Image (cartoon, grey):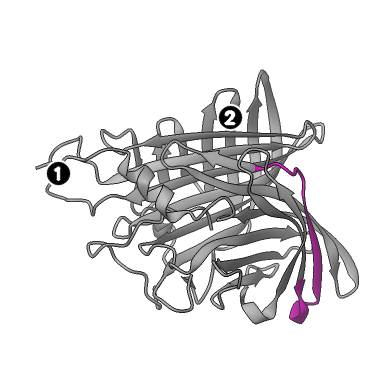
Amino acid sequence: MSPSPLAAAGPEFAIPRPGRVFQFPRDHGAHPRFKTEWWYYTGHLRAQDGEPFGYQLTFFRAGVRKPDPQARSAWALNTVYFAHLALSDITRKNFIFREKASRGALGLAGAAEGRLQVWIDSWRAEIQGEAHHLQARDEGLGLDLFCMPQKPPALQGENGFSRKSSSGDAASYYYSLTRLATKGRLTLGERTLEVTGSSWMDHEWFSHSLAPELAGWDWFALQLSDGREVMLYLLRRGDGSIDPASSGSLIDQEGQVRHLKLADFQITSTSTWKSPHSGAVYPAAWKLEIPSADYTLILTPTLADQEIRAGAAAALTYWEGEVRVEGQRQQQPLTGLGYVELTGYAGKLGGRFEAGIRDQGPGASGQ
């Protein structure tokens, strides 16, 4: 998951329904019949001397109106694109964030259908052979990475249909590539480092807004030393309760997915952190238990301050950061790394994003 373009669906956009048959590599591409979509990469890198880094690169597609195949103008505005690039420099205790946005006209940004190819200017994610090639560079920070899937796509929720509310139709199509062997280059200031590591990719598309009773969500994606992965999300209501649609999955060493309902796991926040930038108070450490799999895990951020404050396409503030995992399964110790995303702690997301999309300006019909 990721902080979403939270505009209302509108009658011209399609709505996710159960029973979709996913096809790859076709479904790595864009789905413009749906209003909102993102391609979301996080990962853990090490330089040749062992220096550790965490990274995020996310591309968002937000439909303004359904594309008109009869439109002739190259200036026609149907879609807004934006992207987030972040690096957690663990050794120097430094968090770096860059962003980019485009109205999607004149070919300056776009997302291909039927194959993975999404770009804004020189920032892009595309499949070359079987590897996902990620490129982004801006103001002293750059990534050029090749990510090779080690497992098949994991269909989240009910065979890829992921409910986002227990009381309405809010849902997405959602799959993950939970372990991608990663290598390439990291540019940091004047340094260019050869890096290797492991990444995670999420791809979601939908048309509904965030359910009105929800304030935000806590999302967890963990790669464990026993070869398994865990994805969990908690949908937080405005009154502080957790929506029963919250769920997750456990992916085994061969890539088989076991769906987890809210009753199958417990997440307890054990600490908090107050942002000196936004004033928001976030959970800052967690105990995670999956009794049926005999997991007890402790999650600790590798940096306290991994708050993203974006403004290129919308005023979005959220915490998106790398965490270290320690714990046990069946009384055997294990470790791991992961990413946690915390939204809605600096104010509800929807209204600010919608205002940001409107601020992109009116689009010509192209007729």
- Cα distance in 3D space between marks 1 and 2: 36 Å
Q: Is residue 293 magenta?
A: yes
The location of residue 53, given as percent across then percent down, is: 72, 38
Using the rendered image of the protein, determine whether residue 135 is visible from the camera's viewpoint: yes
Screen quadrant of the C terminus: top left
Residue 142 shows which numbered tag? 2
Quadrant in the rendering for residue 219: bottom right
Task: Out of 297 and 303, give the one closest to the viewer.
Answer: 303
Q: Which mark is residue 365?
A: 1
Q: Position of residue 207 (x, y in %)?
A: 35, 62
**111 drawn magenta:** no
Asked if 354 appears above or below 222 in the picture, the reply is above
What residue do we see at 37% from left, 70% from top?
A: 16
Q: Nearer the viewer, mark 1 or mark 2?
A: 1
Magenta stretch, residue numbers: 289-306
- The amino acid type found where label 1 is placed reads Ser
Q: Residue at x 49, y 75 (%)?
A: 159
What residue occupies the far top of the structure in this picture? 190
Which residue is drawn at the image coordinates 16% and 50% (left, top)? Answer: 69
* Up/down of 138 relative to 266, above or below: above
Q: Secondary structure at mark 2?
A: strand
- Helix, strand or loop under label 1: loop
First in residue order: circle 1 vs circle 2: 2
